[in-house]
Amino acid sequence: MSVPNILIIEDSRSVQVELVRRIERDLCFNARAVGTLAEAREALKENEWFLAVADLALPDSDDGTVVDAVLEHELPCLVFTSDITRETRRRILSKSVTDYVVKNRHAVDNLVAAIGRLHRIQGHKALVVDDSRSMRRYLSKLLSLHLLEVTAVESGEKALEVLEQDPDYLLAVVDYELEGMDGVELTVKIRTRSELKDLGIIGVSAFANEPLSVRFIKNGANDFLRTPFEREEFQARMFQLVDAMERQRRLRELDELKNRLLGMAAHDLRNPINAVNGFSSILLQTAQDVLDENQRKMLEYIQISGWQMNALVSDLLDISVIESGRLELLCRPENVASLVQERVDIARLLADEKNIDIKVDIHQAVEGMVDRRRIGQVIDNLLTNAIKFSSHGTCVAVELWAEDEAFVFPYATKAPAFLPKNRTSSFFPSKNSATGPLPERSAPALALPL
């Protein structure tokens, strides 16, 4: 895509220099400045311009003729003026200028922002839904002045047909009084479609007998305007909405980028972590005779840390997959009882460090359609939490049974009878005392269909 060319028609040399500098620095566009109407006419013939910024008062023209010269070339025109009397404003708005920017302390920032916004929304699609032909023409003209591609229809049914064929619309202006479904009903139908979540909706109406602004906004519109409205008010609301929709899209793009980076980082971390886990396991299995107690403990710490790091990596992968909506469960018949026992055996190393005993009571061989890895993660998290938040010398009880076409996996902790009450760690409310029986099955930690 070629770099846009901006023509600045301004007689103040210092303003010229500052505008060129800011446009080239902030927007990375090409900018050229001229100081008279004659120079502007020649420049307009010489190049392909994206838009022109025109001061109304020039040495050889102080009546706004420069605006007509720009519009003759069918260019967007941003008027840049310090004269904003009622008469000047009326003259500006009577012409097909894109907008005007008042010269004040924030003028350069406002002008650069207006140029950038106009370039960003160029070519985006806008939909006008109004049963009045004159209003459709007026709204279409206002939107077209900002380089939007406008489609205008007279009913909600036709609007839905347009969006069905092409949902890639940035903005919709919806009148309330439509034949068939009204504007609020149309807004509700639009918001039920997920592919239209990025569509900004402005409700409009001259109907004054109801709080339509509330009805529109509560049913999914982003804004509401009562007609007749000032052109500048409509433009200001539109700019705010377009900026908000752009930020929303950008945030979603950044979120997707973040998920991809998390996924790549997690995959890259897996190999060194698995190597550490593998070597520590080999040493623990093959070097028992040459390891003293401290060395064996250190290797076990390395192994446990490796498992924890692997769990963190899995969490990173899960976050990126879940947020991107691409999580897939690979369910197949599994012996859940053996899976629970396997995870408990792994958790015992961590429990031993705190002198925590794990009691296991598997009532029967429970089988079910599950994703073994995902259910294993859930059980690991439950066991890890039970051990992490229990005091030294307590007991973690684990049970598993089938009940009403589901398997139930509860856990609870209790302190031995010789410990004081304030050292008890309990994960589920129970009527039992701290030194009484373990919590009953009425408080399961996990219940899933078989």
Image: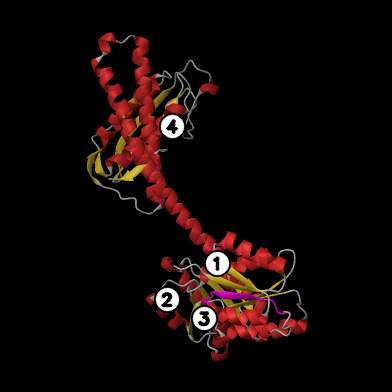
Locate residue 52: give its quadrant: bottom right
**Residue, disc 2:** 163
Q: Callout 1: helix, strand or loop?
A: strand
**Residue, disc 1:** 30
For the residues marked 4 and 3, what is the alpha-carbon distance in whole angstroms?
Answer: 56 Å
Q: Which mark is residue 385?
A: 4
Camera-near label (4 vs 3) is 3
Residue 349 location (% of width, % of height): 35, 22
Which badge, 1 or 2, comes first in the chain's sequence?
Answer: 1
Which badge, 3 or 2, comes first in the chain's sequence?
Answer: 3
Camera-near label (3 vs 1) is 1
Name the residue at 74% across, 80% down. 59
Q: Residues within 10 Å of mark 2 (few under 14, many from 20)?
A: some
Name the residue at 47% across, 25% down. 390
Camera-near label (2 vs 4) is 2
Q: Quadrant of the C terminus?
A: top left
Camera-near label (1 vs 2) is 1
Name the residue at 62% across, 62% down. 22
